[in-house]
Amino acid sequence: MKTRLYEVISGNDIFKMDEEECKPIVEGILYEDDYMGLVAESKVGKTILSQQLACAISVGKPFLGVFDVPKPLPVWYFATEGKKAALKDRFIRMRKAVEVRPENLKLIPCNFRFNTPEGWGCVQELMKTYKDELPKVIIIDALYRAIKGTLKNDDIIGEFHYNMDKIRSHCKCAIVLVHHMTKATRNKDGDYYSRSDIDTYGSAFILGGLDHILWLEKFRGEGSNPAVDKMLKCDNQRSGDIISNIRIQLQTGAALYYESIDRYHEQQHKVLQLLKTYKEMTWVKLESRSEISRTILYQVIKQLELKNQVQRSKGRPVIITLLDGVSDEI
């Protein structure tokens, strides 16, 4: 199976953006051809989040109830650790609250390393067997079991990234790597040092090779429960399109899933007042006049959409319109 490993861009094509490369898979989270990391400390819940991401993409429904998924897409989920029964049980529990399209989802428990001849042979076999069902998103959970050799070795990480690029080129897909962070440490007063994606475990080449990293941490704000309240953050990104600082809550009853927390009541009221005055506004103008950050405004608009108070146009520019008969009360 031969994949071309290069392309040539010349002439006027240098100055033209390929719309396919800019299309969202999950708006504000993942775009066409992205190479993304999802990291967290041990036992924070990154695997549950990555599985919920796979479900949302498979069915084309909003991720976390907030981030739009324009259309259903096929997903391959490589599970490099854990038992098959436990893997299936999590998806069974999640399905009680989160929609999924099974025909668009392939779970692939695997015991190979992607940077070995044996592992690459397995990948080629899968791409050949399912040549008519190639994925648009691949999720690899967890990274440390997907690589042969130490994750602190730059050459090993570079070779792994090279193989991921070959997969992306052949499948024309985005790839999400699920990985862990270094262990949290405390200062002399016993308080934890602040964290960021720089605390991702391993070579700096892991960070350097990715387009962006989402990282998940326990939320310890007033009235919170760190066991279930989390913050989803993005410190560094190349595109400027990734949303950050989203507070989510893990539901652990019969169903197992995350949901975003509707907490921006004051900002929702402010947006409704502006739209009551102007009826409709472009996203840029609304962001400017409301003085609400882009990350928060995205969540505010989504919550107002769910309440059938506003609607958002498709295409560019994005226009927010107040629906008829809606007051500025939340």
Image (cartoon, rainbow, N blue to C red):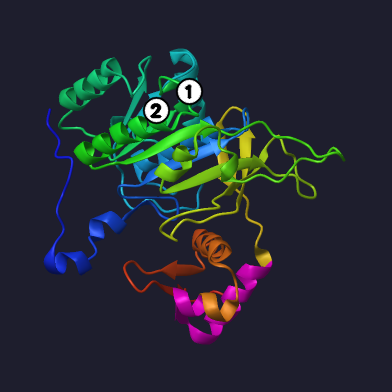
Q: Which mark is residue 54?
A: none
Q: Which mark is residue 150?
A: 1
Q: Residue shown at 35%/16% (left/top)?
A: 112
Going by the picture, which residue comes out furthest to the right? 189
Q: Amino acid at mark 1?
A: Thr
Query: Residue 74, image x and y in percent?
Result: 29, 37
Q: Quadrant of the N terminus?
A: top left
SS at mark 2 in the image: helix
Query: Residue 14, image x and y in percent?
Result: 19, 65
Crowding at mark 1 (Cα within 10 Å: few <14, some 14-19, many 20+):
few
The residue wearing badge 2 is 156
Query: Residue 41, image x and y in percent?
Result: 62, 33
Crowding at mark 2 (Cα within 10 Å: few <14, some 14-19, many 20+):
some
Q: Residue shown at 55%/66% (left/top)?
A: 297
Query: Residue 309, image x and y in percent?
Result: 52, 68
Above or below for 265 versus 180:
below
197 inside magenta stretch: no
Q: Amino acid at mark 2?
A: Ile
Give the camera-side residue of 198 and 21.
198
Magenta span main SS: helix
Q: Are marks 2 and 1 in contact (CB under 8 Å)?
A: yes
SS at mark 1 in the image: loop
Give the residues in magenta.
266-286
Q: Quadrant of the C terminus?
A: bottom right
